[in-house]
Amino acid sequence: MQNATNTHLNYYFETARPITDRVELYVVNSKTGAMTKTVSGDKMPFKDRAYRSRKTIFKLDIQPNSKVDLFASQE
Protein backbone atom coordinates (compact mmCIF):
# COMPACT_ATOMS: atom_id res chain seq x y z
CA MET A 1 0.00 0.00 0.00
CA GLN A 2 1.24 3.44 -0.83
CA ASN A 3 0.37 6.77 0.73
CA ALA A 4 1.38 9.40 -1.83
CA THR A 5 -0.26 12.19 0.18
CA ASN A 6 1.14 14.54 2.81
CA THR A 7 -1.45 13.26 5.29
CA HIS A 8 -1.30 10.36 7.76
CA LEU A 9 -3.80 7.68 6.60
CA ASN A 10 -5.63 5.02 8.61
CA TYR A 11 -7.06 1.85 7.10
CA TYR A 12 -8.54 -1.37 8.40
CA PHE A 13 -7.58 -4.79 7.02
CA GLU A 14 -10.12 -7.56 7.58
CA THR A 15 -9.73 -11.23 6.79
CA ALA A 16 -12.57 -12.96 4.98
CA ARG A 17 -14.53 -15.87 6.32
CA PRO A 18 -14.31 -18.87 6.91
CA ILE A 19 -13.18 -18.76 10.50
CA THR A 20 -9.52 -17.97 10.97
CA ASP A 21 -8.14 -19.27 14.27
CA ARG A 22 -4.91 -17.24 14.14
CA VAL A 23 -3.75 -14.57 11.69
CA GLU A 24 -0.35 -12.90 11.72
CA LEU A 25 -0.01 -9.64 9.79
CA TYR A 26 3.45 -8.37 8.94
CA VAL A 27 3.78 -4.74 7.84
CA VAL A 28 7.12 -3.83 6.23
CA ASN A 29 8.17 -0.22 5.62
CA SER A 30 9.58 -0.32 2.08
CA LYS A 31 12.00 2.54 2.71
CA THR A 32 13.51 1.54 6.06
CA GLY A 33 12.85 -2.21 6.07
CA ALA A 34 11.32 -1.91 9.56
CA MET A 35 8.78 -4.66 10.20
CA THR A 36 5.93 -4.91 12.68
CA LYS A 37 3.90 -8.02 13.45
CA THR A 38 0.38 -8.09 14.85
CA VAL A 39 -1.69 -11.14 15.70
CA SER A 40 -5.43 -11.71 15.81
CA GLY A 41 -7.89 -14.53 15.24
CA ASP A 42 -11.10 -16.21 16.28
CA LYS A 43 -9.51 -18.34 19.02
CA MET A 44 -7.98 -15.32 20.78
CA PRO A 45 -9.75 -13.47 23.61
CA PHE A 46 -10.94 -10.00 22.59
CA LYS A 47 -8.49 -8.35 24.97
CA ASP A 48 -5.53 -9.94 23.13
CA ARG A 49 -6.64 -9.19 19.56
CA ALA A 50 -5.05 -6.55 17.36
CA TYR A 51 -8.45 -4.82 17.17
CA ARG A 52 -11.21 -5.66 19.65
CA SER A 53 -13.95 -6.99 17.39
CA ARG A 54 -15.65 -10.31 16.75
CA LYS A 55 -14.10 -10.08 13.26
CA THR A 56 -10.41 -10.47 12.51
CA ILE A 57 -9.43 -6.86 11.83
CA PHE A 58 -6.09 -5.06 11.83
CA LYS A 59 -5.68 -1.28 12.01
CA LEU A 60 -3.10 0.12 9.58
CA ASP A 61 -1.48 3.51 10.09
CA ILE A 62 0.42 4.68 7.02
CA GLN A 63 2.73 7.67 7.29
CA PRO A 64 2.70 10.45 4.66
CA ASN A 65 4.65 9.77 1.46
CA SER A 66 5.46 6.18 2.37
CA LYS A 67 4.86 2.67 1.13
CA VAL A 68 4.30 -0.51 3.13
CA ASP A 69 4.16 -4.14 2.10
CA LEU A 70 1.65 -6.41 3.84
CA PHE A 71 2.08 -10.14 4.39
CA ALA A 72 -0.53 -12.27 6.13
CA SER A 73 -0.25 -15.81 7.45
CA GLN A 74 -3.20 -17.74 8.83
CA GLU A 75 -3.97 -21.02 10.56
Image (spheres, helix red, strand yellow):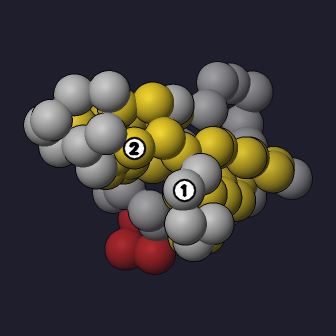
**Callout 2: helix, strand or loop?**
strand
- Residue at 48 percent across and 41 percent down: it is 67
- Residue at 35 percent across and 31 percent down: it is 3
Label 2, on which residue?
A: 66
Q: Quadrant of residue 10?
A: top left
Query: Mark 1 Cα within 10 Å, few/some/many (few <14, many 20+)?
Result: few
Nearer to us in this view, 35 or 23: 35
Amino acid type of the residue that numbered disc 1 sits on in the rendered structure: Lys
Nearer to us in this view, 49 or 26: 26
Horizontally, residue 39 falls left or right of residue 66, namely: right
Q: Is residue 55 above or below residue 43?
A: above
Horizontally, residue 12 falls left or right of residue 74, namely: left
Q: Position of residue 64 (x, y in %)?
A: 24, 43
Check if mark 1's residue and mark 2's residue have beta carbons within 8 Å: yes
Counting residues from the start of the chain, the first of labels 1 and 2 encountered is 1
Q: Is residue 49 above or below residue 11?
A: below
Label 1, on which residue?
A: 31
Q: Position of residue 25 (x, y in %)?
A: 64, 55
Marks 1/2: CA distance? 7 Å
**Callout 1: helix, strand or loop?**
loop
- Residue at 22 percent across and 28 percent down: it is 5
Task: Say whether residue 22 is visible.
Answer: yes
Q: Position of residue 13 (x, y in %)?
A: 48, 35
